[in-house]
Amino acid sequence: MTRPASIEALVKDWADDKISKLFTKVYPENIPLNNEIEEAFKRSGSKIGNKGIARPDNKEICRDPQTNTDIPIMFEYKGYADRHVKYDNDGRVSIKTSAVNNYAVNGAIFYANAVLEYTSYDEVIAIGVSDGIEHKGQLRPTISAYYVSKTNYGEPIKISDFSNLDFLDQENFSVFMKSTRQLTLTDKERQEIHDQYDLDLSTVLKDLNELLNDMGVDVSVRVNLVSGMIMASMPSSTVEDFEPLPYNDLKGLDPTSTRSDGAKINDAVADFLKHKQIPNRKKDQIKRKLTDIFLTESLSDPNVGYSQGESKLKTIYRYVVNHILPFYSRGFMLDFTGKLFDTMNSWVQVPDSGKNDIVLTPRYVTKMMAKLCGVNKDSYVWDLTAGSGGFLVSSMDLMLQDAIRSYEFNELERQKIITHVKEKQLLGVEKNSEMYMLAVLNMILMGDGSSNIINDDSLAFNGCYRFPEGKKDEKFPANVFLLNPPYSAPGHGLNFLEKGVELMRKKNTSNSNTNIYSGNAAIIIQESAGGPDFTHMQMRILAHNSLVASIHMPGDLFLGKSGVQTAIFLFKVGIPHDFKSLVKFVDFSSDGYRRTNRKKAKQNLFNDFDAPGHYDELVRLIRYDNPDTLHYFSLKENYFKDVISPDGGDWQYKKHITRDNTPDGKDFEKVVRSYLAYEVTKVVETDND
C-alpha cells in the first residue's frame, strides 16, 4: 500500500488543536510571540537559506511558577516518523541545513538555538512532532522534547518521548521543568564541546585578523576596535535594557557627520557602558580609548570599503555580529579576549610584545591552577599580572558553579551570591594598557566581573579595592593568588609572587611578623626561578609561606610563543615553611596533549591521551594525596615527596629526581599493571573499531 505524499497537514491540525486547549493564547507560524523572539527569527532565517523570516510551526511561552521564569517552547511538525529526527555520525542531532529543513526535531532545535543565541532567554524547550503509524484514520504522533540551555552550551539534551502534550499543562509544568533542569552534560561531553568550540573560535579569529589586515586596519588599534564592536553588538541577554546596534543601521553616511558609521558604533559603546555596573571613572577611561578609533574618518568612509557605499567599519562589524557573538550566546566561559590577542599576535608583530612578556596561560592550565588553590564561592581571587584575565575567568567559572550547586533550590540566595562574586570577589591588576582593555572586556562578557580590573603598576599596588571611590582604603581580602608573571622581571617574576603573598599576609594582621594562614597561591613561572640563582628571593618568600608542590610542566606548553621551561609552584600563604615537611614533586611533562606550531593550521592542540583526565588527576593528587587512584602518575617515577634545602635553590623537580627515587618492587609492579591495563584497553578499542 502506497502512503500519501504527506500527512504533515494532519499532524499540524492535531498538534495545533492540542496546543490551543493547553494555552490561553496561541501563536502559530505567522503570529509573532514577542518582539525579542521575532527579531531572533529575522536574524536566523538566512542561516537555512531563506531570504525572509524563518519561523517554527508553532510556539508558546510557559511560565514556571517555581522559579518565576518564562520558558519559550518551539514546535516543528513533519509528516511520517521517518522525518522525525536526523542524527550526525557522532550521534548528535544534526544542525545541517538539509536536516533542519526536513526533520521535525532538527527544525525545532534550530529555532530554540536562535532564541538562545539572540534573546535574553537562558533555556528553551524544542519539540518535534510527527506521525508514528496511521491506524484507521487516527494519528498516533511521535513527540520528542529536548532541553536547550546556556548551562549546557546550547547542546540539545533529550528529555523524553511523549504520546501527548499534557506535560505542558500549567499544573504539570513546574514538575516537568524541575526534572528537566537536572539534565546536564557529562564532564567529558563538556570538555569535547569546549575543545571543538575552541577550535572553531580560533578559525574565526584568524579569519577576522586576515580581514583586518586586508582592509589595512593598523595593528595598534585592532584589539580595541574589535573590543568596542563586541560591546556595541552585545545581545540583551548580557546587558539588561541595552539595545544592540544592528549592522544594517550602518548606512555609510558622510564620515564627518554625527551619524557616520563610526559615530553610531561609538554611541552604542557609550550606551552599553551606561547600562553596566561599572565605576564612572572606568567608563570614561574605556570611552576615551575607543572614541578616537571609531571617529577616524577613513574607517567610516563609504568610498574606501570592500564595496562602494559600505565603510570598513560596517564590513568588520557584520563579521563580528555574525561570526563572533554566537560564541557567547550559548554560555561558553571561554577566555575569548586572550584568544583574540593570542591569534593576532601569531599573525602580526605586536609592538613591545617581547619586552612585556605577553605569554597567555592556556585555559586548561588556568582552570587547573584555580582548582589546585581550592577556588569556590567563598574565594577572593586576585591576579597581579592579570593579562587578559584568564585566571579570573577560570576562577569565576568555578565560583559560579559552586554557588549554583550550593543554592540549587534557593534562587534568591543564589543570585545574591553570584552578584557578590562578580562585584566583590575578583581583582586583577594589569599595567599594559592593551591587555588591560582585554581583561576588562573579558570580565564584562562574563557578566560582569570587571569592576575590580585595575590599570596600574602591580608592584605599586596597595592591595585595596580601587572602586567604588568610597571604598578605596578597603583591603581586598584575597585568599587565592594566581599568577603568570613577566619572566624578564627580577627572579623571572618571583618579585610579583613576593609582593602578592606579602599583601595577602598583611591583610590578616597589622603586625607583619605575625603568621596566620591566609590562603593559597599558585604561580606558573620559568622553572629556573626555583634554582640556585634566586635563593635570596626564595628564602624571603619561605620565611612566611610554605611550598606545597612543585610541578614540572610540558616543555612545549607555550610552543611558538615562548621557549622557556615552566613549572607551577603551589604555596600556603602566611605559614612559614617547615624544612622538615615533605613537598610534592610531579613530572607533568606528559599531560596528554600534543602541540604543533603551524601558523596556518586550524588546530595546534591535540588531545591524544585523555588530557582532561591527566589534569583532573593532578588536582586530586596534590589536593587530596590519594595515590591509590593514580593512572597517570607512579610513586617515585614521576611523583614523589621530598624535603627542600634550608639554603634554597632546589624548588625544581630535576633537583630531586637525581636522589634515590628509584621505584621499589611494589611500585614497579603497580607501574607494570597500569601499563598492561592500558595496552588491553587499546586492543579492545581497536577490536570495537
Image (cartoon, grey):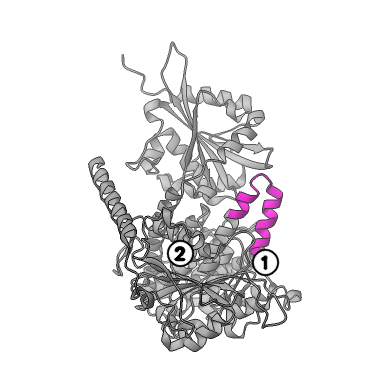
| Figure label count | 2
Q: Is residue 489 visible?
A: no
Position of 159 with respect to 379 (left or right) is left
- The residue positioned 69% from the left and 46% from the top of the image is 410
Above or below: residue 160 compared with residue 634: above
The part of the chain drawn in magenta is 402-423
- The residue positioned 44% from the left and 82% from the top of the image is 529
Disc number for residue 23: none
Instruction: Give the dominant element type of the magenta stretch: helix, strand or loop.
Output: helix
- The residue positioned 40% from the left and 26% from the top of the image is 81
Residue 95 inside the magenta-drawn segment:
no
> Quadrant where the C terminus lies?
top left
Position of 331 with respect to 135 (left or right) is right
Position of 344 with respect to 248 (left or right) is left
Above or below: residue 649 compared with residue 277: below
Q: In the image, residue 226 lies at what x, y percent?
A: 49, 69
Above or below: residue 523 compared with residue 236: below
Say which element carries label 1: helix
Q: In the image, residue 200 lies at what x, y percent?
A: 39, 58
Say which element carries label 2: helix
How would you rate the neighbour count of disc 1 (Cα within 10 Å): few for under 14, some for 14-19, many for 20 or more? some
User: Which amino acid type is shown beneath numbered disc 2?
Assistant: Arg
Q: Residue furthest front?
A: 665
Between the C-alphas of marks 1 and 2, the distance is 23 Å
Residue for badge 1:
424
Q: In the image, residue 235 lies at what x, y percent?
A: 57, 56
Q: Is residue 635 visible?
A: yes
User: Which amino acid type is shown beneath numbered disc 1?
Assistant: Lys
Residue for badge 2:
363
Q: Earlier in the sequence, mark 1 or mark 2?
A: 2
